[in-house]
Amino acid sequence: MRTPTIARHGRLKKSNPFATITRFLAAALAVLMVSGASVAAIAAYDLAASVKPGVELVGDDTPVSIPKIGAWEGGLNLLLVGSDSRKGQDPAFGEDDTGDLNDVTMLLHVSADHSSATVVSFPRDMYVPIPSCPDPEDEDNPYPSMSYQKINTTLSYGGLPCTVLTVEELTGLDIRFAAEVQFSGVIAMSNAVGGVPVCVGARIEDEYTGIFLDPGEHTLMGVDALQFLRTRHGVGDGSDLTRIGNQQVFLSSLMRTIKSADTLSDPAKLYSLAKAALSNVVLSTQLQNVDNMVAIAMALKDIPLEQINFVQYPTGSVDGGVEPNVEAADALLAALATDQPIQLGGATGGTLPDPNAPVDPNATIDASAVDADGAVVPDAVTDPAAPGATVLPSDILGQSAGQYTCSDGRTLDDQ
């Protein structure tokens, strides 16, 4: 039995959150059915040739039966991780001395009736039990389990299968699909979608990532999109938790962009997005199957923006990081396990209401929340709850893709 060794964090300047990728990947897969049969037929060979070698998860030898044409039947779970490895990346991002930490770990859950989807972000510094994980180079000598380690060490400890096993143990959900992305993937896919408009509510200043943004709307792509997602010092209170909120600002806008007519009616843009995803993302073996990709995309494509929720896994502070808030997490996981629509307790830190957000006529508005000019105060407006929605505890934070929010920036004077 070997003694486990855990990779240490790199310097903060090299941290790498990739919250964008869950939605980028879903959009990329959708190209095969929204761009028309002819485009799909022409692109099929090129897309297949773009796929990187797959990673076999524990249980991947179990056959999966899906329709050749049509949406995935029932619910599904897909894990997306962002690696901080510099292997094969531009030297501008630093030398490859940081190990291979999953600084972003996100779980996409789609309900069995395909009426809602939830993306749960697990804070990188959250202490969790890590189960025994297989060693791909030595099947007879698996890595031993550990009772209390940060979740972002799982990728360096036992690879993508280990991260999947850890999240399965934490949530009780069965995860059949997984993917891993690095810096280049975010850059390529933000370019393919043509940029993402984000609202900055207070100035962002971050010398570590080199991003400086004034209040207002900015359309971000390429390296700028990557650095916006990486910034921690420049938003909220400078913690990884408020960085998750900043990423949710981007994710929500990304979903609105992808679902807009400008994207869905442009086969060339959709094809570019699909190829960028497949060329830059390492997929588990069952996710590499084109039939599976199409089925998953078709399960996602008709879900309303208001029922696509981005959630921060609830935690409490401990020395050196955070640990799960078990009571709140149980409420969230029970709703996911039973496919109940959810109503979140509030917005994640690091965000501000967008003063220019359109008001949904079906939204709930506090009658007393009107300013002196008769205008509705933005944060008094909430999305209409789905019928039978489970109202989650107030400390389960996040937002839907239908909510317009801004990044709560942080200047150098406050750091």
Image (cartoon, rainbow, N blue to C red):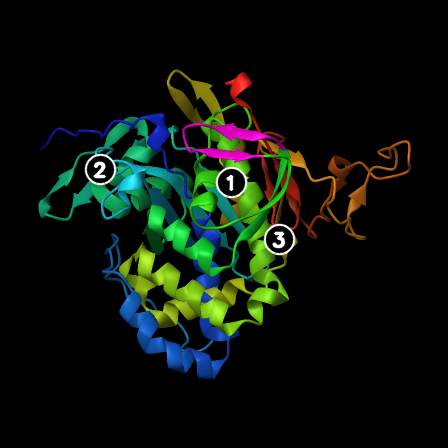
Residue contact between numbered discs 2 and 3, judged by CB atoms under 8 Å: no
Which quadrant of the rendered structure holds the N terminus?
top left
Query: Of tags 1 and 3, which is closer to the observer?
Result: 1
- The residue under label 3 is which amino acid type? Gln
Query: To which residue does mark 2 refer?
Result: 96
Q: Residue 125 got which mark? A: none
Callout 1 crowding tier (Cα within 10 Å): few <14, some 14–19, many ≥20: many
Q: Does residue 232 appear in the picture of this structure?
A: yes
Is 84 inside the magenta-drawn segment?
no
Query: To which residue does mark 1 refer?
Result: 247
Using the numbered discs, state the Cα–Cα distance from disc 1 to disc 3 in whole angstroms. 18 Å
Residue 96 percent across, percent down from the top left: 22, 37
* Sooner in the amino-acid sequence: mark 2 or mark 3: 2
Q: Does residue 116 appear in the picture of this structure?
A: no
Query: To which residue does mark 3 refer?
Result: 307
- Residue lying at the far right of the rendered structure: 373
Callout 2 crowding tier (Cα within 10 Å): few <14, some 14–19, many ≥20: some
The secondary element bearing badge 3 is classed as helix
Q: Give the range drawn in magenta.
A: 202-213
- Report the number of numbered marks: 3
Q: Is residue 377 left or right of residue 151?
A: right
- The residue under label 1 is which amino acid type? Gln
Residue contact between numbered discs 2 and 1, judged by CB atoms under 8 Å: no
Residue 352 percent across, percent down from the top left: 65, 34
Residue 144 percent across, percent down from the top left: 18, 34
Q: Is residue 413 left or right of residue 386?
A: left
Q: Nearer the viewer, residue 111 or 346?
A: 346
Taking the spot 48% from the left edge, 23% from the top edge, the residue there is 316
Q: Nearer the viewer, residue 410 or 124?
A: 410
Taking the spot 46% from the left edge, 54% from the top edge, the residue there is 190
Taking the spot 44% from the left edge, 78% from the top edge, the residue there is 69
